[in-house]
Amino acid sequence: MNSSWWNRIGRAALALGLALPLVASCQQTAPAAPASPAPTTVAAAATPAPALSPAPDLDFAAWLEGARADAAKRGITPGTINLALTGIAPIERIIEADSRQPEFSNTFTRYISSAVSAKRVTDGRAMMAKHAKLLVALERQYGIPGRFLVAFWGLESNYGRNTGSYPVINALVTLAYEGRRGAFFREEMILALSILDKGHITVDEMKGSYAGAMGQTQFMPSTFLRYAVDGDRDGHADIWQNVPDALASTANYLNKLGWDPKRTWGREVRVPAGFDLRNVSLDVDAKENVKSLAQWAALGVRRADGGALPSQDLQAALVMPAGAKGPAFLLYDNYRITLRYNRSAFYAIAIGHLADRLSGAGGLTAPPREADPLRREEVVALQEGLVTLGFLTTADGVMGSGTRQGIRAFQLANGLTPDGYADRSVLTAVQSKARAGAS
């Protein structure tokens, strides 16, 4: 946490006579804003004007006045602005939560074990039985199988049990003022005010995740205004308390994003001994090395149970999120649609695996790879070593696809297993080579 940033907040809050609240953390991550709007039964927001970028050099009081003025220019009524933005202050814990993302603070094995736990599977199957009629109707209308809707529901809020305890407006104000993604969150804040202005929910009831995602399937305000629907036709689109509305809105969202109802998300597979790991995709989008199922079969890739791959004209990418010692997956286009909901490879694979488990499939067949995740300082050290050796251009502490590609290039150059996976053995090897080259 930047101490000067927090000191500025504290001074501004004291000047306004405000307390600095600390709110219990929420584990959900926010669904990504969709790339383009689509028709919805909920009135769409007015055509957005470009949101002003936050000015981190302003104290909070001045910044908030600017935000109030922006909201007024966008047509938000004075009553809503005063009700939502009076007596508000940034929340320190939100900044801390925003800096922790699953791929940077967790391993795939730990993530999937928690996301697709035995209890979540059992509870999800019970929800599928309880809402069977609704799920059939939604699949008929939107083309999204019920097992996927329930999987999103389960991961986003544990089937409605944990929708988040942060006041959404306060969370969005905090992230907009903090500035790392200030323009995005400032726009979401104004759209959240629009939701209040339209009477969909009260400011006290508008609770959500630390990033402002709301309801049982965690919609950002922009997503709500574009895709929320009145599933039970009672005149309101209530994603907070109403299960038919929440699931129908999610089905509408996935449908508009382009979900292919004729395909699944992907599948766990096994690769043969001596498989060329340069065929494995390292990017989150899994768009490198895309091949047909027939081509993967010709390379020896088979189903996880050893059976032949489906004989379908289908394109797929191969990923190994825990490296060569963990499970392997062939991923289809619906995996990439899931990334539009939450841009995390761990999340998207967990959604697909949970959906499979809900329909009766067993657990992953590959043995888990148990290891502690690299700490941020270790990631930076790894990157600095790769930079020194010419396999990377910058060390930013983020384990992105560029770093994974750099690791693979280093592994290939040094006779190591080229899976692009970052662990302490790779860190040790990179640092040793970098020291040797400098001596």
Image (cartoon, rainbow, N blue to C red):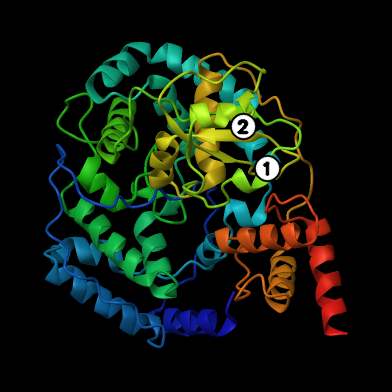
- Amino acid type shown at disc 1: Asp
- Amino acid type shown at disc 2: Leu
Number of marks drawn: 2
In the rendered view, does 75 fall on the left or right side of 397?
A: left
Q: Which mark is residue 21?
A: none
Marks 1,2: beta carbons within 8 A: yes
**Residue 163 versus residue 46: which sits nearer the camera?**
46
Disc 2 target residue: 299
Q: Quadrant of the N terminus?
A: bottom right
**Residue 423 versus residue 106: which sits nearer the camera?**
423
Indicate the position of residue 153 as horizontal and vertical percent values: 44, 32
- For label 2, the SS is loop
**Residue 57 versus residue 376: which sits nearer the camera?**
376
Q: Is residue 433 above or below residue 363?
A: below
What residue is drawn where x is 25% and y is 79%? 66
- For label 1, the SS is loop
Tell me if mark 2 has few (under 14), some (14-19) or many (20+) residues whose alpha carbon lies within 10 angstroms of its own: some
**Residue 282 versus residue 93: which sits nearer the camera?**
282
What residue is drawn where x is 69% and y is 47%? 107
What residue is drawn where x is 63% and y is 57%? 104
Disc 1 target residue: 276
Q: Quadrant of the C terminus?
A: bottom right
- Which of marks 2 and 1 precedes in the sequence? 1
